Image (spheres, rainbow, N blue to C red):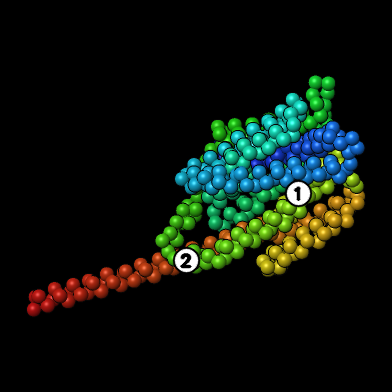
Amino acid sequence: MLPLGTLRKRIEPVVLCAQIASAFFDTGLQMVVKEQCAIATDALNPTPTEDSRQKAMSNFYMIYNMLSKFVPILPAIILSKVSDLGYRKIPIVIPLVGYLVSRVVLLLVIVMDLPIQAMFGGVVVHGLSGGFCSYWAGVMALVSLTSTEEDRSLHMMQMELVYGIAGLIGSLVSGHLFQLYSVDFKQGTVLVSLSVFLYFVCLVYTMFIFLMPTVSPSAQERNETNGIDTQYSKNILNILLLFAGGILFDVAVGGGMEILVTFEMKEPLNWNATQVGYGNAAGFLVFLTSFLGVMVMSRWVSDVTLIIIGMVSFAAGIYFMAFVTATYMFYLGKRIIRFIYSYQSLKPERDRERETQQERETARERYRERDTQRQREKEGERDRDTEREGARHQ
C-alpha cells in the first residue's frame, strides 16, 4: 500500500472516480433522451413511428455533440496557457466544475421533468470550462512532467488503462443502477445522483487533497532546444499533416460511433438500460486491448503496419455494423472495431517520445560543438595575446 503522502501526489484516483461518474452519466443521458424523445413524439403525432422517434433522438445528439466539440476549443487554449505558467491544477479543476454542473442539469431534468433541451445549457457550461480536451490534456501533461523520460510512455499507458477499467466498471453497473427507483425517486435519479456525488468528490480531492508533485529533472531538459533551429521546428508540413490526420480520424471514428448511440435505441435492438450499460462497457474494452496491443504487437511489426491494422479493423467493424440485426452481432462488430485503438491510441505517444529523444540528442550535440568552437576561439585568443606580449618585450 502506498503511503498517504505518496498517494496524495497521484492523479489516478481522480481519473478513476471521474470516469466511473462519466460512465453513469452516459448511460443515464442515453436512457433519458430515449424516454423524453418518445414522450415528445407521441404528443405531437397521433400515430408516432419508430423513425420519428429516432429522428428526434438524432437531432438532439447532433446539436449536443456539436456543442460539446466546438464550445471547448477557445477555453481549452486559454487553460493550456494558464497551465504553461505553472498552474497545473487549473486545467483539471475548472473542467471538473463544468462536469459537475452539467450532471446536475441532467439530475434536474429527471427530478423536475424539465425538457431535454435543458441539457444544451449544461453542455455549454461544460464546454466553457474546457471540457474533456482540457481535462485530459491537463492529466497527461501532469503525468509527462512528473515522470522520467524512460518510463513516461509506460505511465501514460497505465493512465489510459485506469481510464478504461473505470469506464468498464461504471458502464457494467450503470444499467442496473438506472432501474432503481421508488415512490419518492424516479427512474435514473439514483444513477445520476451518484454521478454528481462522484464528480463532487473528484473536485474536492483535486482542490484540497491532491498535492502537486515536484517536476522531474528530465522535464527541464525540454528547454534545451529553445532558440535552436531543430529539424522538428522546421518541419511544418508534418505538423499540418498530423492536424489533418487527427481531424479526419475524429470525423470517421467519432461520427461512426455517435450513430451507434441512436441505433441501439431503436429496432431491431431496442436496448434497455442494462443492455446500454453493457454496450458501453464493450466500448471501454479498447483500453485493455490498447495496453496489450502496444506492449505485445509492437515487438514484431512496424509502426506503419500497426496503424494500417487499426484503420482496416475500424473500417471492417463499422461496415459490419450496417448489417446488425441482433445484439450478439453488435458485439461481434464492436470486437472488430476495438482493435483500432489497440494500435493507434498509444503507439504515437511512444513515437513522439522517440522523436523527442532524438531532438534532444541533436540539441546536445550542437551545444557541445558550440562549446568546443568557443573553447578553440578562447585558446586562439590566448595564443595571440601571448604572441603580442612576447613581441612587446622584444
Q: Which residue is mark 2?
A: 230
- Left or right of residue 314: residue 122: left
- Left or right of residue 97: residue 362: left
Residue 122, horizontal then vertical, whole percent: 66, 35
Q: Quick one: label 1, few (<14), some, or many (20+) residues within 10 Å?
A: some
Q: Secondary structure at mark 1?
A: helix
Going by the numbered disc 2, the residue's amino acid type is Thr
Disc 1 versus disc 2: distance between alpha carbons?
40 Å
- Left or right of residue 46: residue 152: left
Q: Which mark is residue 217?
A: none
Residue 12, horizontal then vertical, whole percent: 63, 42
Is residue 173 visible to the viewer in this orientation of the structure? Answer: no
The quadrant where residue 114 appears: top right
Q: Which of the pair 59/106 is nearer the observer?
A: 59
Residue ID at (60%, 64%): 241
Residue ID at (82%, 59%): 319
Q: Which of the pair 152/110 is nearer the observer?
A: 110
Is residue 263 visible to the viewer in this orientation of the structure? Answer: yes
The quadrant where residue 246 appears: bottom right
Q: Quick one: label 2, few (<14), some, or many (20+) residues within 10 Å?
A: some
Q: Are marks 1 and 2 in contact (CB under 8 Å)?
A: no
Going by the numbered disc 1, the residue's amino acid type is Glu
Q: Which residue is mark 1?
A: 258
Front position among marks 1 and 2: 1
